Each structure stands twice: as C-alpha cells, then as structure tokens.
Image (cartoon, rainbow, N blue to C red):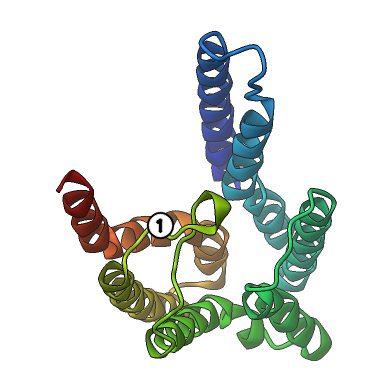
C-alpha cells in the first residue's frame, strides 16, 4: 500500500508543471482571453487519472474487495455529478458509462468478484461494437471540431476505426490475461490505472489515420 504514494507524488509534480505552464501562457494572452477553465479542466483530468484510483486501492487493502467496489461506485457517482453541473451531456456514451454501475451492483448484490473484474473486457468489447457500427454507418465520424466540422475525412475515419478495433482487441486480450493470471491485489492496481496502460495502445492505433490527415493538410 506504500506504493500509493507514487501516483500522489506524480500528480503533484504534473499539476505543478501544468499550473506553471498555464501561468506562462496567460502572460501572452489577450485581455479578453481566460486560461483558467482550461487549467481547471487539466487538473480535473489529472486527478481522475492519478488520484481517483487511490481511495479504491486503499479501500481494498484496508477493508477488502467489496469495499473497493463500493468506493469505485461512489467515485463514479461523484464524477457524473460534477460533469452534470458542468453541463456535459452523455447521449453518445450512455452504454459505456453504465458498465461500471452495472458491474459494481452485480458484484455487491451477489458477492461474486467476476462481474466487476469483467469491466475492462466489457469496455473493450463495447468499443469494438461501436466502431463496427460506425463502419456500417458510413456517414458517421469519429471526431468533431468546433462548430461541428469533422477532423478526419471518410477514408481517414475508416482507417482510425480499424485501428481502434485492433487496439480494443489487444486490450481485451490484456484484460483477460490480467483477470486470469494476476492476483486480486495486483488486478486492483491494473484496474485502477488501466487508462495509463491503454492510452499508448489507443494513441498508436490512430497514428496511421493522423499521418494521412497531416499529409492531406500539407498538400
């Protein structure tokens, strides 16, 4: 449990660098421009990535797996409340967001750890299905810029979707390996910081589409 100090220290370092960077950038902004919302958003994302898993892992070591699941569910509710008051809508993410409360509720009601441990695998499967649906609906796009314009062309969107499908399948294999091979204490760490593990895979998956986009922009 002493290793929980590591993500806290990393958060302090990164948040300090972020604040310093925003202060430096604000010196070059116009008077009508405000960098505080971006700074708050950056710190919020860093806290989700590094700090939110800490109480889940702490609860596991102190009180057991069911307590960790309860804390994870409480943190999920806190995040949804904060995002609701910030005016964020989840129309396109309802199924993805319902995975955690569904798995947590089944585990808490039955005492079976399997339902909660299947969450990373279920997320990967859902991601694959969403991308396959997007490939069938050829008019839909992955990323949207300001005012609703699309970032990728149709060919680039298709390439990015296939990349995300490949990354999700790789993530599914990793998740199932972790579920079967890791001890429960090791798996809790894997679950808490799986975003750090999946992020490089997901970034690499859309690299070919980004390269194609850059070449198109240059031409």
Height in image: 91 above or below 149? Answer: below
Label 1 crowd bin: few (<14), some (14–19), many (20+), radius 10 Å: few
* Near-viewer residue (101 or 53): 101
Residue 194, compared with residue 141, is above or below; it is above
Q: How many marks?
A: 1
Q: Which x, y percent locates residue 54? A: 65, 49
Q: Which residue is mark 1?
A: 199
Q: In this rendering, would 85 be left or right of 183?
A: right
Q: Residue at x 57, y 48 (%)?
A: 49
Q: Quadrant of residue 45?
A: top right
User: Where residue 162 appears, x then y in whole percent?
Assistant: 29, 77
Q: Name which residue lies at 34% across and 62% down.
A: 152
Horizontal side of residue 32 vs 193, given as left or right: right
The picture places residue 67, in percent across and down from the top left corner, at 78, 67
Q: Is residue 206 left or right of residue 175?
A: left
Residue drawn at x 71%, y 78% is 98
Q: Position of residue 52 (x, y in %)?
A: 67, 50
User: Measured along the vertical axis of the image, is residue 205 above or below residue 174?
Assistant: above
- Front residue of 2 and 26: 26
Seen at 38% across and 76% down, the residue is: 168
């Amino acid at each position: 449990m002493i290793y929980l100090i590591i993500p806290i220290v990393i958060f302090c370092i990164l948040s300090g660098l972020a604040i310093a960077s925003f202060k430096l950038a604000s010196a070059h902004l116009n008077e009508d421009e405000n960098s505080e919302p971006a700074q708050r958003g950056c710190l919020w994302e860093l806290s989700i990535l590094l700090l939110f898993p800490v109480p889940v892992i702490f609860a596991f070591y102190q009180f057991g797996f069911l307590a960790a699941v309860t804390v994870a569910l409480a943190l999920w509710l806190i995040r949804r409340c904060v995002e609701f008051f910030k005016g964020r809508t989840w129309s396109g993410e309802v199924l993805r967001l319902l995975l955690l409360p569904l798995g947590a509720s089944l585990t808490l009601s039955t005492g079976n750890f399997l339902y909660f441990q299947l969450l990373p695998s279920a997320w990967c499967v859902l991601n694959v299905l969403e991308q396959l649906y997007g490939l069938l609906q050829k008019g839909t796009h992955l990323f949207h810029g300001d005012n609703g314009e699309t970032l990728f062309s149709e060919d680039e969107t298709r390439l990015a979707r296939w990349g995300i499908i490949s990354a999700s399948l790789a993530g599914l294999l990793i998740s199932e390996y972790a579920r079967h091979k890791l001890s429960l204490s090791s798996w809790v760490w894997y679950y808490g910081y799986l975003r750090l593990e999946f992020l490089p895979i997901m970034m690499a998956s859309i690299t070919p589409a980004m390269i194609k986009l850059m070449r198109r922009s240059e031409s």
